[in-house]
Amino acid sequence: MSPTLEAIFQRRAVKVFEPVVISEELREQILNAARHAPSSFNSQPYRFYWVRSATKKVVVAKLCLGQKPAETAAALVVAVADLGSLSATAQGQLEWMRGSNFTEEKIRDYERKAKIGRILFLPGPFGMFAAIKRALFRLLNLRMVIGMPPLSRQELFKWATKSTSLACENLMIAAEALGLNTCPMEGFDGRRLSKFLGLSSRYHEIVMVIAIGKKSDAVVVEPRWRRPLDATVTIL
Ligand SMILES: Cc1cc2nc3c(=O)[nH]c(=O)nc-3n(C[C@H](O)[C@H](O)[C@H](O)COP(=O)(O)O)c2cc1C
């Protein structure tokens, strides 16, 4: 079997970890794999907070409702959907294109798309722009085939959460491939954890916390059940 598939099939949500140290090199490889996940418009709308300090881990584990995977993890990764990063990302990509061998036409094309993105993605005060844009898109949709972009802040977070979740999966598969184990968690106090990390509710939403470590040999991981393929797939 291919090593990638092996890591995918082997990965389990591990509930108790051994106290191990994750080297800087491993950490970098895992985080690098995360940011190589696909993202909408390559916008990479997330930030990962890698919590390794013992004292901070205690606080974050408590805010993960004292769950065992959080308490025993070697590191906790808080995956945050980050709407505040969008303009800097577009700027960064533009600078990278200018420094690389991209034609003027390609650079202008990206500039134009980034500008449209900025206009589309700006909800405005009290979501006013979103309401106007939604009405316009609905009207257009009566006449032509169009996709509805995320307009309200809530839709923007949903949009950013998709890309963040893909990066989380990459992170977990990479950890598995490198001999580590993980447990994704949505059981946490989002308000307190956001405050602890200094996040702003306007731009940030915590998507999940991932506990990373080495599975404890003392704990048996029960076999897992999956719905049969035909229950989750429709072939047309
Ligand atoms: C979005 C999400 C949230 C989860 N939250 C928790 C959690 O808070 N605590 C926990 O112990 N496991 C959590 N899990 C792990 C699941 O229980 C686990 O993935 C599922 O039972 C399937 O088992 P497997 O990952 O070992 O295949 C979560 C998984 C996902 C994808």
Image (cartoon, rainbow, N blue to C red):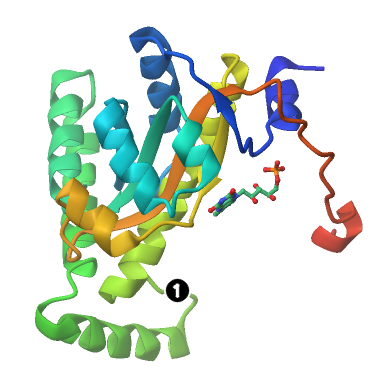
**Camera-side residue: 220 or 105?**
220
In screen coordinates, is 177 left or right of 59?
A: right
Image quadrant of residue 104? top left
Q: Amino acid at mark 1?
A: Ile
Q: Is mark 1 within 8 Å of ligand 1?
A: no
In screen coordinates, is 220 left or right of 16?
A: right
What secondary structure is found at the residue carrying circle 1? loop
Q: Position of residue 54 (x, y in %)?
A: 30, 27
**Camera-side residue: 54 or 128?**
54
Work out which quarter of the rendered image holds the C terminus and state it.
bottom right
| Residue found 33% across the figure and 64% down from its top | 157
| Residue found 33% across the figure and 44% down from its top | 60
The relative height of residue 96 versus residue 39 in the rendered view (above or below) is above
Q: Is residue 41 visible?
A: no
Image quadrant of residue 7? top right
Work out which quarter of the rendered image holds the N terminus and state it.
top right
Q: Residue furthest left?
A: 125
Dot 1 surroundings within 10 Å: few (below 14), some, or many (20 or more)? few
Q: Position of residue 66 (x, y in %)?
A: 45, 49
Image quadrant of residue 182? top right
The relative height of residue 202 versus residue 7 in the rendered view (above or below) is below
The relative height of residue 144 versus residue 117 in the rendered view (above or below) is below
In screen coordinates, is 146 left or right of 4?
A: left
Q: Is residue 62 visible?
A: yes
In screen coordinates, is 226 left or right of 55?
A: right
Residue identified by numbered label 1: 146
| Residue found 47% across the figure and 30% down from its top | 73
The mark total stands at: 1
Q: Position of residue 77 (x, y in %)?
A: 38, 36
Q: Position of residue 200 (x, y in %)?
A: 15, 59
